[in-house]
Amino acid sequence: MIRRHRLRGPTVTMSIYLDPQTDLLILKAKDRSGRSKSAEALIRLRDHLEKFPDFYNSEMAEVIPNNLEPKSQN
């Protein structure tokens, strides 16, 4: 769904599930900044995506070890 806000232009609504610890961190951050919870989450998500635009590129995937695979027993 796309909504138009007078000052911000078009936006897209997105719902996510947060674990309690992450929710608490967002709540504390929004209280410190004076922003709404949605605005705080948007700013932090945008900042992360700008800092790490290619987080899952092929070169990075080769560097990150897969810790989920069981280790072979000798």
Image (spheres, grey):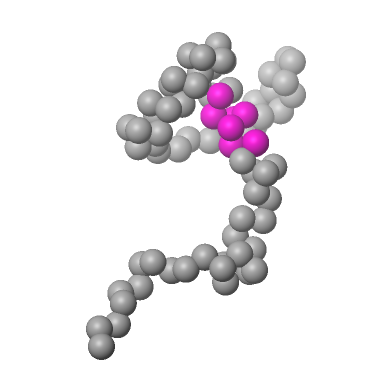
Query: Most extreme residue toward the bottom, as rendered?
Result: 74
User: Magenta stretch containing residue 43, yes or no?
Assistant: yes
Which is more toward the observer, 7 or 41?
41
Side of 36 where 57 appears, left or right: right
Write down the quadrant of residue 56 in the picture: bottom right
Q: State the image coordinates of residue 59 (x, y, percent, origin top left).
A: 64, 68
Residue found 56% across the figure and 15% down from its top: 33
Q: State the image coordinates of residue 41 (x, y, percent, origin top left).
A: 54, 29
| Majority SS type along the magenta span | helix
Q: Is residue 1 above or below residue 55?
A: above
Which is more toward the observer, 15 or 55?
55
Q: Quadrant of the C terminus?
A: bottom left
Residue found 48% across the figure and 14% down from its top: 31
Which is more toward the observer, 62 or 17?
62
Q: State the image coordinates of residue 63 (x, y, percent, origin top left).
A: 56, 68
Query: Most extreme residue toward the top, as rendered?
Result: 34
Which is more toward the observer, 9 or 73?
73
Q: Is residue 60 above or below residue 25?
A: below
Q: Tell me if I can see residue 13 in this picture.
A: no
Q: Quadrant of the N terminus?
A: top right
Residue found 35% across the figure and 37% down from its top: 19
Magenta extent: 40-47
User: Magenta stretch containing residue 44, yes or no?
Assistant: yes
Side of 27 where 35 appears, left or right: right
Query: Most extreme residue toward the front, as rendered?
Result: 74
